[in-house]
Image (cartoon, helix red, strand yellow):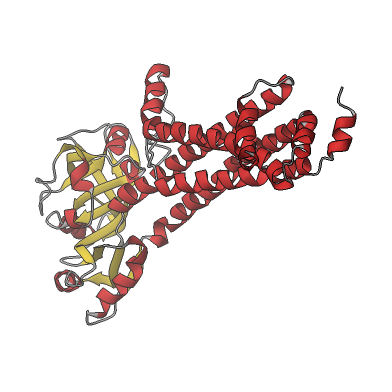
């Protein structure tokens, strides 16, 4: 019977109604604190994972994984495309021409990043064709001078399908009238939305049309690559470029978007560390409640020692009790956290609809909604680490209980 004392008495102390209600209150607060800490950690880390996923799928779906270019214009781009696509890790390649410019619409003038693309190969390196809101890329043909705008930019300029915008590029033409900027009228043939800041500053035209304005002729600025491993894009680009004759410059997404990814990862670590303090506070409450429990149960501990209970068994009683509190809190926290991670996007959308507000404005943030991606590895890490510190928190109160002298404790019992 004595061999089962730690489990039997520890669970009995957990269930029993105590004479000291303050101890019960502290134990309840400890359990609730663990539940809230674990739940919030899972939900917040899931949201951070969601932002990381959206960055990869949306931002890097529009931004090239790697780029091959040359000093000046690239005239042999067709040979480059044919050669690099033979690399087993290159999933697609597409030529491009790029320029900064100004777009003049009905109601406003706005700066824009103008991409000249090849519609036939654009889908191989970009998600833009899959995110058209209105119109299509079919009319984007050489000499048609059509333009596709982000939906936010289209609203800012006050234009829609069939309207015309004037494009001005930072190049000048010298003639008898003097020095004049180069500009051309384009017809809006479609709008896209990827839920990112690119919707507000990106315009897409046919690469030949942009090349005519820039006086490139048949040349382009370079070739965009899509690779199978984002985080190895530079190496893959360098390997693909080695198969080409001539000098080519290789760059990858980390040069333009790397700081954003690093910021997300740093925020995830720091937010996780700060929120883990909630769990630490709850664990300290477990220590407090067990210390007070030991003081309250000195007489019963003395009786158990007199009946032959060993020091390790007395320690086991309070380890079992503290561990049970931790397990209950962790289990509830994991259940609520997983449920919250799965539904947080719908809950936030409901609040936005009811309160008629928007928490993430697409003109300010790179996405306009709260994403969430539950990773079971995060759930396991949170649950296991919280369980470990919960068990460690029981050791000091249990050791204190094992050091109680039966004679001293019973002397003051009435």
Which residue occupies 34% across, 72% down? 235
In the foreground, 13 or 80: 13
Q: Position of residue 180 (x, y in %)?
A: 29, 53
Instruction: Kindly identify the residue that appears in the image at 75 percent across and 45 percent down.
Output: 399
- Please indicate whether residue 199 sits to the left or right of residue 390 in the image: left
Identify the residue at image location x=31%, y=55%: 63
* Left or right of residue 40, residue 222 in this image: left
Front residue of 87/121: it is 87
Residue 214 at what x, y percent from top left?
A: 24, 60
Relative to 110, residue 106 above or below: above
132 relative to 264, above or below = above
Closest to the observer, 235 or 246:
235
* Quadrant housing the N terminus: top right
Image coordinates of residue 392 in percent, x first then y, are: 65, 47
In the rendered view of the protein, which quadrant contains the C terminus? top right
In this view, the residue farthest toward the top is 354
Residue 394 can be seen, yes or no = yes
Q: Quadrant of residue 252?
A: bottom left
Q: Is residue 382 left or right of residue 182?
A: right
């Amino acid at each position: 019977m004595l061999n089962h004392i730690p489990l039997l008495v520890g669970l009995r102390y957990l269930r029993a109604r105590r004479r000291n209600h303050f101890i019960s209150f502290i134990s309840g607060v400890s359990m609730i604190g663990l539940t809230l800490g674990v739940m919030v950690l899972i939900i917040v880390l899931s949201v951070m994972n969601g932002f990381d996923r959206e960055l990869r799928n949306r931002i890097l779906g529009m931004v090239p994984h790697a780029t091959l270019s040359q000093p000046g214009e690239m005239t042999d781009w067709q040979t480059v495309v044919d050669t690099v696509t033979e690399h087993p890790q290159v999933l697609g390649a597409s030529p491009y021409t790029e320029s900064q410019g100004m777009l003049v619409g009905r109601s406003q003038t706005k700066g824009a990043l103008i991409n000249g693309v090849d519609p036939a190969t654009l889908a191989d390196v970009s998600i833009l064709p899959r995110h058209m809101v209105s119109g299509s890329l079919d009319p984007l043909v050489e000499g048609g001078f059509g333009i596709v705008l982000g939906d936010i930019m289209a609203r800012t300029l006050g234009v829609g399908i069939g309207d015309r915008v004037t494009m001005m590029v930072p190049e000048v033409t010298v003639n008898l009238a003097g020095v004049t900027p180069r500009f051309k009228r384009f017809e809006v043939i479609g709008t896209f939305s990827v839920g990112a800041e690119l919707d507000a500053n990106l315009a897409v035209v046919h690469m030949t049309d942009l090349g005519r304005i820039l006086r490139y002729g048949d040349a382009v600025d370079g070739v965009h690559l899509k690779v199978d491993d984002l985080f190895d894009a530079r190496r893959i680009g360098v390997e693909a470029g080695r198969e080409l004759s001539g000098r080519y410059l290789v760059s990858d997404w980390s040069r333009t978007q790397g700081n954003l990814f690093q910021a997300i990862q740093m925020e995830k670590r720091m937010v996780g560390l700060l929120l883990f303090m909630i769990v630490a506070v709850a664990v300290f409450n477990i220590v407090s409640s067990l210390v007070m429990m030991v003081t309250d149960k000195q007489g019963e501990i003395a009786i158990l020692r007199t009946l032959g209970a060993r020091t390790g068994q007395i320690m086991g009683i309070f380890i079992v009790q503290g561990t049970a509190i931790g397990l209950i809190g962790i289990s509830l926290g994991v259940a609520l956290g997983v449920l919250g991670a799965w539904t947080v996007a719908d809950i936030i959308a409901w609040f936005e609809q009811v309160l008629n507000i928007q928490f993430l404005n697409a003109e300010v943030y790179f996405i306009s909604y709260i994403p969430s991606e539950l990773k079971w590895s995060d759930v396991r890490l949170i649950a296991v680490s919280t369980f470990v510190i919960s068990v460690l928190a029981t050791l000091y109160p249990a050791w204190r209980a094992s050091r109680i002298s039966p004679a001293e404790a019973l002397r003051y019992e009435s």
